[in-house]
Image: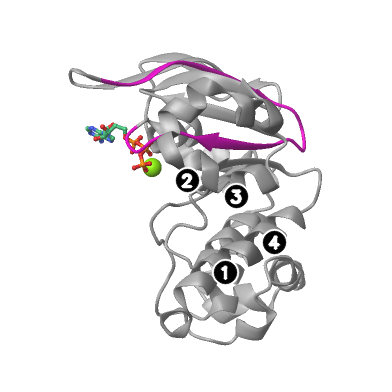
């Protein structure tokens, strides 16, 4: 469903991603681990097209999308949520979802209330709000909701574009342990045919959600395999030092 071949990116003299080749099957849930600065977010930017790669290619559902801009890749089903917050603060939760859905369905109009009223848009908003537990917050303004709910909404906004592949950059960063647990449940309850690629620092989440794990270190794939193999790997223990014991 999603494949990269030999992706490379340097910023000046800094070689950030090196020869990254990944292959995700439809419905696969892959977690990317790696220390700070390993190149995880850079790889995502290359995947979605925000950064042009120096070398290599990206393939989505069998099609080479390397030359396509962000919006075109998104329209073909590649969606992401960000490490940093990217919501419309002046709008409600429902309106944020509706905006994403209406762009996807092609119902976006200059008159805001018209877009939201379209049945196709309403259906997606309801559906996604249920999936990411946002029903109680639909009419709240984004500026009023908690940080954790904002993170849920970011996933919801990405889902409202009805992606084939959803990329999430540290979806639980900055939320407390309780909220993070809720997030695991939420991810586990997403449709099984949705392909997920998640950057995560939290080992619990990684092992809880992942079918497969990829570890990046200095921009290179140093591990690619099953979670149970990752646990036993001495290389990974070295990279992560003590944090492995917490998993
Ligand atoms: N636009 C840029 N220009 C120059 N250097 C950059 C740029 N973006 C990232 N880098 C550098 O690339 C390296 C990898 O950064 P990246 O954000 O991809 O790491 P990461 O694995 O996502 O880290 P973290 O876990 O902290 O989010 C870092 O050394 C960073 O300073
Ligand atoms: Mg990052």
Residue at x 37% of width, y 26% of height: 52
Task: In this rendered view, identify the residue nearer to me: 2 or 105.
Answer: 2
Residue assigned mark 4: 186
Give the Cα distance between marks 1 and 3.
13 Å
- Categorize mark 1 by other alpha carbons within 10 Å: few (<14), some (14-19), many (20+): some
Task: In this rendered view, identify the residue nearer to me: 38 or 151.
Answer: 38
Task: In this rendered view, identify the residue nearer to me: 122 or 51.
Answer: 51
Answer above or below: position of 38 versus 150: above
Residue assigned mark 1: 179
Residue 201's disc number: 2
Q: Earlier in the sequence, mark 4 or mark 3?
A: 4
Q: Secondary structure at mark 1?
A: helix
Q: Earlier in the sequence, mark 1 or mark 3?
A: 1
Q: Nearer the viewer, mark 1 or mark 3?
A: 3
Q: Are marks 1 and 2 in contact (CB under 8 Å)?
A: no
Q: Secondary structure at mark 4?
A: helix
Residue assigned mark 3: 204
Q: Quadrant of residue 185?
A: bottom right
Question: Quarter containing ligand 2?
Answer: top left
């Amino acid at each position: 469903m999603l494949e990269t071949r030999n992706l490379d990116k340097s910023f000046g003299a800094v070689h950030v991603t090196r020869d990254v080749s990944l292959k995700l099957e439809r419905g696969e849930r892959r977690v990317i681990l790696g220390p700070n600065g390993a190149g995880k977010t850079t790889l995502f930017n290359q995947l979605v097209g925000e950064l042009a790669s120096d070398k290599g290619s990206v393939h989505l559902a069998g099609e080479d999308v390397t030359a396509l801009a962000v919006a075109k890749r998104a329209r073909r089903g590649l969606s992401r949520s960000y490490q940093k917050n990217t919501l419309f603060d002046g709008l409600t939760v429902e309106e944020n979802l509706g905006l994403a859905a209406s762009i996807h369905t092609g119902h976006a109009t200059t008159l805001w209330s018209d877009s939201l009223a379209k049945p196709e848009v309403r259906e997606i908003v309801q559906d996604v709000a249920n999936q990411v537990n946002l029903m109680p917050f639909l009419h709240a303004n984004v500026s009023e909701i908690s940080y954790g709910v904002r993170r849920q909404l970011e996933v919801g906004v990405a889902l409202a574009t009805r992606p084939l592949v959803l990329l999430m950059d540290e979806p639980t960063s900055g939320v407390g342990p309780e909220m993070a647990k809720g997030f695991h449940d939420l991810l586990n309850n997403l449709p099984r045919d949705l392909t997920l690629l998640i950057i995560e620092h939290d080992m619990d989440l990684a092992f809880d959600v992942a079918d497969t794990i990829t570890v990046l270190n200095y921009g290179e794939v140093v591990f690619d395999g099953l979670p149970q193999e990752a646990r036993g790997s001495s290389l990974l223990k070295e990279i992560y030092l003590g944090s492995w014991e917490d998993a």
